[in-house]
Image: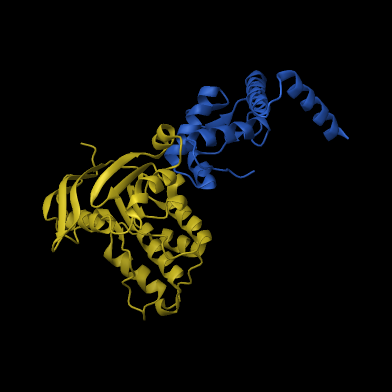
Amino acid sequence: MDFQIQGSRPIWLQLAEQLRQRIVTGVYPPGSHFPSVRELAAEAGVNPNTMQRAMTQLETDGLVITNRTAGRTVTDDPAALEAMRGQLAAERTGEYFKDMKALGYSRADAAEIARREGEKNDE
Amino acid sequence: MNELVKCTGLCRDFGSVRALDGVDLTLEPGKIVGLLGPNGSGKTTLIKILNGLLQPTAGTVEICGAAPGPISKSLISYLPDRGYFPDWMRVEDMVELFDDFYADFDRVKAGEMCLTLGLEPGSRIKTLSKGTKEKMQLMLVMSRKAKLYLLDEPIAGVDPAAREFIMKTILTNYNEDGTVLISTHLLLDVEQVLDEAIFLQRGRVVLHEAVDSIRERTGDSVDALFRQMFRSDMW
């Protein structure tokens, strides 16, 4: 999946989100070498300083570990990865409930719709 | 002292027209900065003063602490807003010329960029399209390991796909300790590459701020802010 930079939100935030997604979904497997800021900046077509800020956020998240000599690696701590996966799931579900509220559905109705549509997708 | 460029009270008149009207500006090393403004806002005039092609009517300029002169010219790599190359020369002749002329020119890099940009070293300049000429100029300018790159409208003449390619070329080839000043009004194409944006309006700096700080403050893109601020200038 390519980096997508959209209109209005800070670019570093969007980059950090998309890097988190890549780590959680195993694009960069646990314990593996993490690309350099310069490589990632070139890939995304963004300023290296902006990518650096996103990288700092990932380090704060505990998803990426900086070794003094060997560059950066993805964390191999399953708990850290699982925690981030849970956080991403919660954020997106929160967005869903906000959207459904705007459409006039109660929380219970929204949950019911989610369950029903989920089953439809299974078929 | 960590200032690459320092302008104080810079003014420049062309006859009765005031092109720059009291510009105070400081640039630090290691940044990619957009010089943005509608046509006739003073972008090219400012760039020409920075590289010593024009003298200011009033005010001072310092490049690494000294007025523009022979030393600053060896530190600045300049892409003019128009081509100035003799038609009969070949791309490889230009590489030769730049290599002779500038101590910081990197031939290996020039060769690599010719490959990625699809420039044939043996082509004569008169056979190149407008966009390809721009690519060649860019290749020459970015092959120097300069302290300051002044790029005047580097993407104006090329199609959107080539613009992206050119921005990537700038991004992957600039000297990391150097600063790149890009003048343009095609903001959508450059926004994500910039550290900072400078808005010029009728010869004055009306905004100088980090791109992500603009996005955080206004909740909108720099492009949107630009359109909003300069709407009244269009008619």
At horizontal 37% and vertical 50% (from top left) the residue drawn is B231
* Quadrant where the N terminus of chain B is found in the figure: top left
Figure check: A77 above or below B79: above
Query: What's the residue at 76%, 22% (across, down)?
Result: A109
Give the residue furthest to the left. B58
The answer to which quarter of the image holds residue A25 is top right
**From this viewpoint, is residue B147 visible?**
no
Image check: B165 left or right of B217?
right
Residue A11 position within the rendered picture, expressed as x and y whole percent measured from the top left:
48, 38
Question: What colour has chain A?
Answer: blue
Question: Residue B158 or A74: which is nearer the viewer?
Answer: B158
**Residue B198 position within the rendered picture, expressed as x and y whole percent measured from the top left:** 32, 45
Q: Colour of chain B?
A: yellow
| Quadrant that contains the C terminus of chain B | bottom left
Residue A47 visible (yes or no): yes
Is B161 or B36 nearer to us in this picture? B36
What scheme was used to colour the molecule? by chain
Q: Looking at the image, which is closer to me, B70 or B221?
A: B221
The quadrant holding residue B155 is bottom left
Residue B128 appears in which quarter of the rendering?
A: bottom left
In the displayed structure, does residue A93 sit left or right of residue B149?
A: right
Give x and y (percent) for residue B11: 15, 52
